[in-house]
Amino acid sequence: MSAHGDPVPLQSRRSGALSGTAQVPGDKSISHRALILGAMAVGETKITGLLEGGDVLDTGRAMAALGAEVVRHGAGAWSVHGVGVGGFREPEQVIDCGNSGTGVRLLMGAVATHDMAVTFTGDASLNGRPMGRVTEPLSLFGTRAVGRAGARLPLTLVGAASPVPVRYATPVPSAQVKSAVLLAGLNAPGQTVVIEREATRDHSERMLAGFGAEITTRATDEGREITLTGRPELRPQTIAVPRDPSSAAFPVCAALIVEGSDVLVPNIGLNPTRAGLFETLREMGADLAYENPRDEGGEPVADLRARYSPGMKGIRVPPERAASMIDEYPILSVVAAFAEGVTDMPGVAELRVKESDRIDAMAAALRACGVTVEDGPDWWRVTGTGAGGVKGGATVAARLDHRIAMSALILGLATREPVTVDDAGPIATSFPIFEPLMTALGADLTKEIR
Ligand code: S3P
């Protein structure tokens, strides 16, 4: 089932050379944070390039339910009139975060140190995902949570009336958990400290500093230690959201595996905590260039140029790189299927608790298309077919997971037989223009299933 309506099957077929420019949408992680911090500032934050995908729109509605004024002025152009740190009002209704783990986890943090109760829910995928990783550190502030078994949604948070600051070492590498604690720390007196063993995406830290919060990061023996001083007055900002590297991954990887392709993907955010896929592809021998590298709004940005790259080689992806490409393993596994030799992907237990169990979902998809995949609790391994090519000819279950749907459709652009996705609806959560954008490059995507 699609998140909002009937399933929409989509088929991809072997395509001729892809060419042209792919203007992918705004960064999902940064879009969520721009809306949330805008709502916690005093005055009007202006945002351009906001991702208008289902996940982010759900966060925008949540901000309005909490008392901020959220207005759309045109494509990607939004303003948020914030209520200030500590100024959220208790929402009248349940907050529905749809498919978005980032949305719900960041929102739980943002409301946790307000003296009010908020109930969260989501779709079948989100309601199956673990929330204890967030409710546990939030309990240290004095917040209470009552959810379904295993701290699953629907879940009610009763915010701390007199929050205390927290020092917390994240047990799993998660920017969502880190960000939830930092957002809760905004309305706690004193200093809230988060320590992460491995660096995860740092958009929250960068944006908090941009809004005028006192926040410092230092390397310690335990890992990255982030210290936030509570109860700042956040100053409204003008934010230009860079384009999403996780969305750019799809046209880039399509160009690498479809014969004769040459695709430009401009203005991509290349924050090092997000760019692990592109580094990996280059190590595999991809013809992938960073053109015109520059800095925009505190984030490194470049234009990516990807060309067809026969003869790529499988590699072992270093586990310490996992956090910087955690959402890109599904599409990497597709490229790995066309490479020569084995691609080893260790240290990725987190993939099992995303919108779906992404190792299981992609292993099933690739095996059905004739590719050898082995997997264990926190690792998987794809044996590439190299010059022999990939058979295809399967229907893949998207499992309410946008990245599984898109990865399977990119796979089908280069397999001998078509690949069908049972429901492309979830793609709208992060990349609503995926189908027209890929079609304009020359991809053969169709609802006429053969
Ligand atoms: C995100 C963090 C990651 C990532 C997700 C977006 C964020 O999740 O998978 O798509 O914006 O903070 P985890 O924090 O669970 O690793």
Image (tube, rainbow, N blue to C red):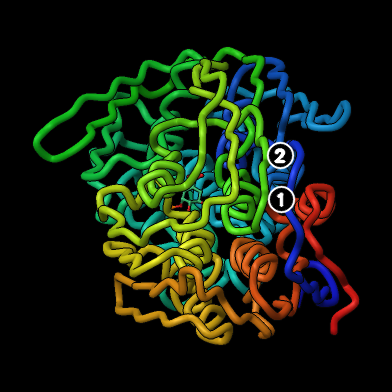
Q: Which of 335 and 99 is in front in this view?
A: 335
Q: Residue at x 65, y 44 (%)?
A: 90
Relative horizontal placement of residue 407, taking residue 379 as reference (left or right): right
Label 1, ligand 1: CB separation under 8 Å: no
Q: What residue type is labelled 2?
A: Pro
Q: Nearer the viewer, residue 114 or 425?
A: 425
184 lies above or below 157? above
Q: Mark 1 points at which residue?
A: 431
- Residue 84 locus on image (x, y percent): 59, 22
Can residue 85 be seen in the rendering of this structure? yes
Could you tell me which residue is drawn at 38 percent across and 24 percent down?
Answer: 230
Whether residue 161 is visible, yes or no, is no
Provide residue 324's location: percent of width, then percent of height.
Answer: 39, 45
- Disc 2 residue: CB within 8 Å of ligand 1: no
Q: Type of residue at label 1?
A: Phe
Snapshot quadrant of residue 119: bottom right
Q: Does residue 50 lie above or below 170 as drawn?
A: above
Q: Are marks 2 and 1 in contact (CB under 8 Å)?
A: yes
Where 189 falls versus 375 (above or below)?
Answer: above
In the image, what residue occupies the spot 80% across and 72% down? 10
Mark 2 Cα shell of 10 Å, populated few (<14), some (14-19), many (≥20): many
Q: Quadrant of the N terminus?
A: bottom right
Check residue 25 in the rendering and tell me which mark sits there, or answer none: 2
